[in-house]
Image (spheres, helix red, strand yellow):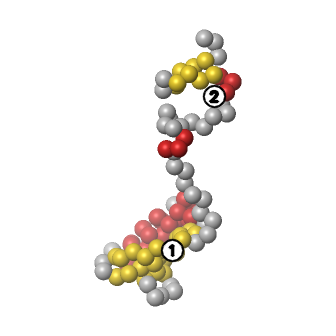
Amino acid sequence: MPGVTTILGIAQHADRAASRPCTGGLPLQNIRMATKLEKELRREITIDGKPYVVRIDPAGLKLTEKGHRKGTELKWDELISGEAALAVALNASVTGT
């Protein structure tokens, strides 16, 4: 039929296909979308037996030892641009680790 294509065994009309979300053949109730990060999220983790707090917010993430304020901070734009990896490599070369 003209204007009809078959995707994953389901007939799609060309004029309506663009208005429907692509689900890969799964029912819409089985598709899970990521939740937008709009406020701070804190979680406690243990590294080498020591408790740490991971804070994730729209600006970036921060890892601090539990009960302390200062820690390692990473901004999302630094992560995307590669500056964070460059800083880690530079730090490792200076300290010799």
x then y, percent, for residue 68:
47, 88
In this view, the residue farthest toward the top is 1
Circle number at residue 17: 2
Quarter holding the N terminus?
top right
| Mark 2–mark 1 CB contact (< 8 Å) | no
Say left or right for 80 vs 97.
right
Front position in the image: 75 or 51: 51
Front position in the image: 82 or 57: 57
Say which label, 2 or 1, has the lower sequence index: 2
Quarter holding the C terminus?
bottom left
Q: How many residues crowd mark 2 within 10 Å: few (<14), some (14–19), many (20+)?
A: few
Residue under pointer 1:
42
In the rendered view, tell whether residue 54 sits above or below residue 70. Answer: above
x then y, percent, for residue 6:
53, 21
Seen at 65% across and 22% down, the residue is 14
Q: Amino acid at mark 1?
A: Arg
Measure how far apart labels 2 and 1 are at the Cα level.
Answer: 41 Å
x then y, percent, for residue 9:
48, 23
Q: Amino acid at mark 2?
A: Ala
x then y, percent, for residue 92:
39, 72
- On the question of residue 59 being in view, the answer is no
Q: Secondary structure at mark 2?
A: helix
Seen at 67% across and 27% down, the residue is 16
Circle number at residue 18: none
